Image (tube, rainbow, N blue to C red):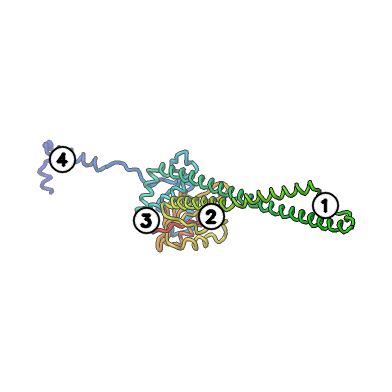
Amino acid sequence: MNTRRSSLGYGAKPSGHAAAQDSTSAALAELRKGVHVPSMERAPQEFIKQACENMKQEVPGAEILQYTDQGGLKIPEEAREGVCSAMTAEWIRLGAQNSQADASKAFGSVLQNDVGKLANAQVAEMRHGDQIKQKNNAIMAQADDIQGAADDAKSMMALQKDMNKQLRRNDKFLEHADKEMRAGQPMRAGVDTLSLRKEVLLKNQKAALRQEAGAINAALPGAVSQLQQKQAALNVETDQFRTARGGGLPGTQVHDFKEFANGFTDHVKTNTAANGFYRIGLKGPDGGHVIGLHKTDGECRLMDANTAEWKTKNHNDMCELLTAHVNEMYLDRNYTHFDITQYKHP
């Protein structure tokens, strides 16, 4: 090699071949620079980063896979309240269809490139949820109306019964008085009897009450049946809504909304013992939030739209990390209740 370099002669004018080689080398060097690919990892807001560091201190085995920090995303105005629910649904959907590594990568791509999709999903979910609430409120109002009608019919029947007693008592007295008068005995003084006009009026009122109460009672079974059909249809729609919030997996609420208490971590451990995905719903007077969990027999994951996607060594650490999130991020935001919905992985 040294001999060949010497034969080129440093003082000689480069030949045409040498010039071509230099040009090629320069071109290749430029090509090797490639293109600048923006990092998929977004820098979180400083207070989010600090909160995550605090939680890592509490759960040393927890590892951040990628920051999510929805507050740092360019979310469209129509979803300005946040996209935590849509993010959780997408995270569960991707997790159910891919390995954990591939799911995490795909989820990061969505956060980087398709926030609009999440915003649209969030808005659609909110509208659908509002529609379900309105339908449920309407059913509850109809149920109250039916109950009110049933109570009215019951009151009418009671009033009719009282009127009937008055009429029977009056008839009995008049019958007894008639017998006494025929026997030549004077009518007893101080006995309040109904005038003929009052008697006729009372009989008419009793008949009207009987007719109205009868009509109400006859209509009640049909009204109840129709309302039951509406409720059954709404139950199906609610199940479909819950499935959509679980990325397409059927969901079951395993823990209804209850206040946070000292046993929160134990509640979570008990109700997330089975393998699968979970939505932890947080609720307060000013709104709500959602955190996703993925329980396996080994490593588990947690995704909070406000902080990061996390990996833990086991189920216990995942539950401890969730508790750390609640303490670090949400108790001071007036979140007072939580529920747990399970999505079984097929």
Q: Is residue 287 left or right of residue 93?
A: right
- In the structure shown, which secondary structural element does the residue marked by tag 3 occupy? helix
Report which residue position mark 1 lands on. Answer: 193
Inter-mark Cα distance, 4 to 3: 47 Å
- Tell me, yes or no, whether the two marked residues, 2 and 1, touch with CB atoms within 8 Å: no
Q: Residue at x 72, y 47 (%)?
A: 204
Would you call the spot at circle 2 few (<14 residues within 10 Å), some (14-19), or many (20 or more)?
A: many
Q: Nearer the viewer, mark 1 or mark 3?
A: 1
Kind of residue at disc 2: Phe
Q: Nearer the viewer, mark 2 or mark 4?
A: 2
Q: Residue at x 77, y 54 (%)?
A: 166
**Measured along the vertical axis of the image, is residue 288 above or below residue 316?**
above
- In the structure shown, which secondary structural element does the residue marked by tag 1 occupy? loop
Where is residue 225? Give x, y as percent.
54, 52
Q: Is residue 8 left or right of residue 276?
A: left
Q: Residue at x 32, y 43 (%)?
A: 37
Report which residue position mark 2 lands on. Answer: 338
Would you call the spot at circle 3 few (<14 residues within 10 Å), some (14-19), or many (20 or more)?
A: some
**Measured along the vertical axis of the image, is residue 19 above or below residue 65?**
above
- In the structure shown, which secondary structural element does the residue marked by tag 4 occupy? helix
